[in-house]
Image (cartoon, helix red, strand yellow):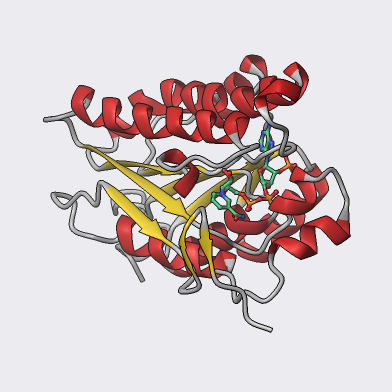
Amino acid sequence: MHEVTDTPDSAAPSRPLAVVTGASAGIGEAIATRLAGEGFRLLLGARREDRIRQLAARLGAEARVLDVADESSVAAFCAGIDRLEVLVNNAGGARGLDRLADARSETWRWMWEVNVLGLMQMTRALLPALEASGRGHIVNVSSTAGFEVYEGGSGYTSAKHAVHAISRTLRLELAGRPIRVTEVSPGMVETDFSLNRFVGDAGRAADVYRGVTPLTAADIADVVAFAVTRPAHVNLDEIVVRPVQQASAYKLVRHG
Ligand code: NDP
């Protein structure tokens, strides 16, 4: 249990609130589940309403449809949140593995709108509520692609490099105010990430994880839960998590 007990007594402090974007699947769903277990109240956002509603029902949480890339959707989602302890900017992903010579503007636009502009829009909208709580915490789910590059990956790596730059900039801009900024950078995690990257090509997606014991979404949730339950004066700036078989974007040792 992370905090004070939940009680109907309005004079008593309520449980801390966490917003998780991209909570309908994978890492976001695991973070939501884990934070509920840590005693947080949760507000879940994603585009697939049926999935976030089911998860919210399971966790005793609230769900609202959210497209982080759409400013009016962000505004509607954030309306009425005037006090917030944790914002997990998790919504994101990759599309394609095209070399720059073959880059498609629409997939680049998608990656930048969701991973970068979406994160900016959610953070900008919720900064006042994070500050009002007196103990705000922004967790940006970035990637090892935020500091490494690989051929065919420039659309995604450039977007995650931007997340890295934004996280560092925010830490400077918020210094002295009660808002922590943690960037979590996972290596390979087995979720629908590759299926979405390869637009439903299950064979190609499965090949990504061939011969590897990848991280699970729960492994990342574990790290996020650790970061947000440190004492309020402690900031874990950057956390890099990889499977043991993956030493870098270019060093993956497959077994079998
Ligand atoms: P998934 O594809 O399984 O999940 C992506 C989530 O993002 C879904 O819940 C999806 O929900 C949500 N999402 C996508 N677009 C939007 C949008 N416009 N507005 C709101 N939500 C959106 O992948 P992961 O769980 O693996 O990815 C989560 C994060 O982790 C991403 O930022 C990804 O870049 C990062 N990451 C993943 C790694 C991996 O190997 N899996 C490694 C490193 C980082 P919906 O479709 O319902 O909107």
**Residue 239 in the image, given as x and y percentages of width and height:** 33, 54
Query: Residue at point 60% right, 39% down?
Result: 151
* Side of 198 where 58 appears, left or right: left
Q: Is residue 31 above or below residue 93?
A: below
> Could you tell me if residue 113 is visible in this image?
yes
Q: Is residue 21 above or below residue 158?
A: below
**Which quarter of the rendering shows the N terminus?**
bottom left
**Residue 36 in the image, given as x and y percentages of width and height:** 50, 63
**Residue 216 in the image, given as x and y percentages of width and height:** 58, 69
* Side of 3 where 101 appears, left or right: right
User: Which of the two residues, 242 or 31, is positioned nearer the viewer here?
Assistant: 242
Query: Residue at point 71% right, 71% down?
Result: 210
Number of marks present in the image shown: 0
Q: Is residue 47 above or below residue 40?
A: above
User: Which of the two residues, 197 or 23, is positioned nearer the viewer here?
Assistant: 197
* Side of 215 where 86 appears, left or right: left
Query: Residue at point 47% right, 43% down?
Result: 142
**Residue 61 in the image, given as x and y percentages of width and height:** 60, 54
> Could you tell me if residue 68 is visible in this image?
no
The residue positioned farthest toward the bottom in the image shown:
256
Query: Residue at point 58% right, 19% down?
Result: 75
Q: Quadrant of ligand 1?
A: top right
**Which quarter of the rendering shows the C terminus?**
bottom right
Q: Is residue 33 above or below residue 132?
A: below
